[in-house]
């Protein structure tokens, strides 16, 4: 299956690396992953009207609404992993699949089967309810947004102690510093998308 990836930042490049053994990554594909910040979704969707667009944004409801203005063929998922995540810990939330009879339903099936080779796929939440873009955003407002906000606040304290040698730092501070460093894995576009959560 041909698969396009728009967005050559750290996450788009990472997706290309892990997906290229399972897909032919091509610029002329009709199924396209949008690995861009939410602020670019409207423009990219308009440029790829009537194609099968795959939403991997950290906020699902607003990004999905942007895409649906240009095509009905929108598959939505949120990979909860990055380059540093161990392979066995990769999870992906699927929030929207195409209806049967879509001209892209076979492409979606092939895409999801291929993506399952790099990540566990979750279709239901912790209560057994099917994920939707809205239920995803409600959950992420309580978890993903909270983690980013906490790390940003703690970064002030970590930065004030950057000249202190490691042997003089207590383990509690070291753990806090390691948590703050998770922000280093997040490109600015990812943080922008996380903070666009309508339930924040």
Image (tube, rainbow, N blue to C red):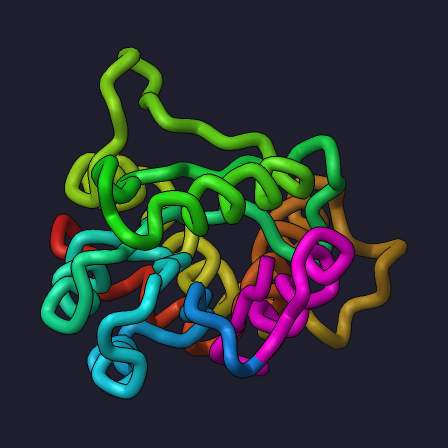
Q: Quadrant of residue 71?
A: bottom left
- Residue 113 x/y as whole percent: 56, 37
Q: Is residue 179 above or below residue 154?
A: above
Number of callouts: 0
In the displayed structure image, the side of residue 86 where residue 179 appears, left or right: left
Q: Magenta span has 92? A: no
Q: Quadrant of residue 64?
A: bottom left
Residue at 45% x, 40% y is 109
Give the quadrant of the N terminus.
Answer: bottom right
In the displayed structure image, the side of residue 184 where residue 109 appears, left or right: left
- Residue 46 x/y as whole percent: 21, 83
Residue at 70% x, 73% y is 162
Q: Magenta span has 16? A: yes
- Residue 147 x/y as whole percent: 42, 48
Residue at 21% x, 44% y is 133
In the displayed structure image, the side of residue 90 where residue 62 appears, left or right: left
Front-lying residue, 143 or 189: 189
Start and end of the magenta stretch?
1-26
Front-lying residue, 150 or 109: 109
Q: Quadrant of residue 180?
A: bottom right
Front-lying residue, 110 or 167: 110
In the displayed structure image, the side of residue 174 where residue 90 appears, left or right: left
Front-lying residue, 180 or 101: 101
């Amino acid at each position: 299956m041909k698969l396009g990836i728009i967005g050559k930042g750290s996450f788009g490049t990472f997706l290309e690396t892990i997906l290229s053994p399972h897909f032919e990554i091509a610029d002329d594909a009709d199924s396209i992953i949008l690995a861009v910040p939410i602020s670019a979704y409207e423009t990219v969707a308009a440029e790829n009207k009537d194609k099968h667009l795959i939403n991997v944004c950290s906020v699902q409801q607003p990004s999905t609404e942007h895409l649906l203005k240009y095509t009905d063929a929108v598959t939505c998922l949120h990979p909860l992993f990055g380059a540093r995540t161990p392979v066995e810990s990769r999870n992906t939330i699927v929030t929207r699949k195409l209806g049967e009879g879509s001209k892209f339903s076979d492409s979606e099936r092939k895409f999801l089967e291929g993506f399952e080779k790099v990540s566990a796929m979750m279709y239901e939440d912790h209560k057994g309810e099917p994920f939707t873009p809205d239920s995803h955003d409600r959950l992420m407002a309580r978890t993903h947004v909270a983690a980013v906000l906490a790390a940003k606040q703690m970064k002030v304290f970590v930065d004030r102690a950057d000249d202190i040698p490691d042997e003089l730092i207590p383990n509690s501070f070291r753990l806090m510093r390691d948590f703050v460093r998770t922000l280093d894995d997040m490109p600015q576009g990812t943080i922008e998308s996380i903070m666009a959560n309508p339930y924040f």
